[in-house]
Image (cartoon, rainbow, N blue to C red):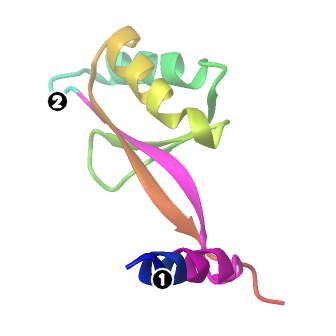
């Protein structure tokens, strides 16, 4: 029994880091549906002026946006701040997206 556990842990240690993709956290933000254009722009301005936000891009959906945090490890905290402190944010979910290595 001990040998099986040790073998399993050795396999985990020997796994090549090049084979595992790096992950980037992105926050999917959904705004409330009944917003005017002025309210939408004001909400997006509030999100963009957060010092922890790197970028905001619009998704295909009418009220959905992708927010890229400056710090990958703080995405959960930023999602919570967006829900609790920014008016008109209905939902914010953290999505882990694998980054593909650049081919040379």
Within-10-Å neighbours for mark 2: few <14, some 14–19, many 20+: few
Camera-side residue of 45 and 38? 45
Work out which residue is located at the far bottom of the displayed protein and give it.
Answer: 104
Q: In terms of secondary structure, where does tag 1 sit?
A: helix
Q: Which residues are magenta?
A: 9-31
Residue at the spot of label 2: 33
Instruction: State the quadrant of the C terminus.
Output: bottom right
Q: Image check: 64 left or right of 104?
A: left
Instruction: Estimate the x, y position of residue 16 in percent, counting from the top left.
Output: 69, 82
Q: In percent of the image, x 76 and y 88: which residue is there? A: 103
Classify 74 as above or below 7.
above
Going from the N terminus, do you reach mark 2 or mark 1 first? 1
Q: In percent of the image, x 57 and y 25: which residue is there? A: 48
For marks 2 and 1, give the CA distance.
Answer: 57 Å
Classify 88 as above or below 31.
above
Q: Image check: 43 left or right of 53?
A: left
Q: In percent of the image, x 39 and y 13: which residue is there? A: 86
Q: In percent of the image, x 48 and y 83: which residue is there? A: 3
Magenta highlight on residue 65: no
């Amino acid at each position: 029994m001990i040998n099986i556990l040790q073998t399993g842990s050795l396999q985990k240690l020997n796994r090549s880091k090049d084979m595992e993709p790096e992950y980037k956290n992105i926050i999917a933000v959904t705004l409330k549906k009944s917003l005017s254009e002025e309210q939408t722009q004001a909400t997006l301005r509030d999100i963009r002026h957060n010092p922890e936000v790197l970028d905001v891009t619009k998704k295909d959906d009418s009220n959905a946006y992708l927010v890229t945090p400056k710090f990958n490890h703080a995405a959960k905290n930023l999602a919570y701040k967006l829900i609790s402190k920014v008016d008109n944010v209905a939902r914010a979910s953290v999505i882990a997206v694998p980054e593909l290595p650049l081919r040379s």
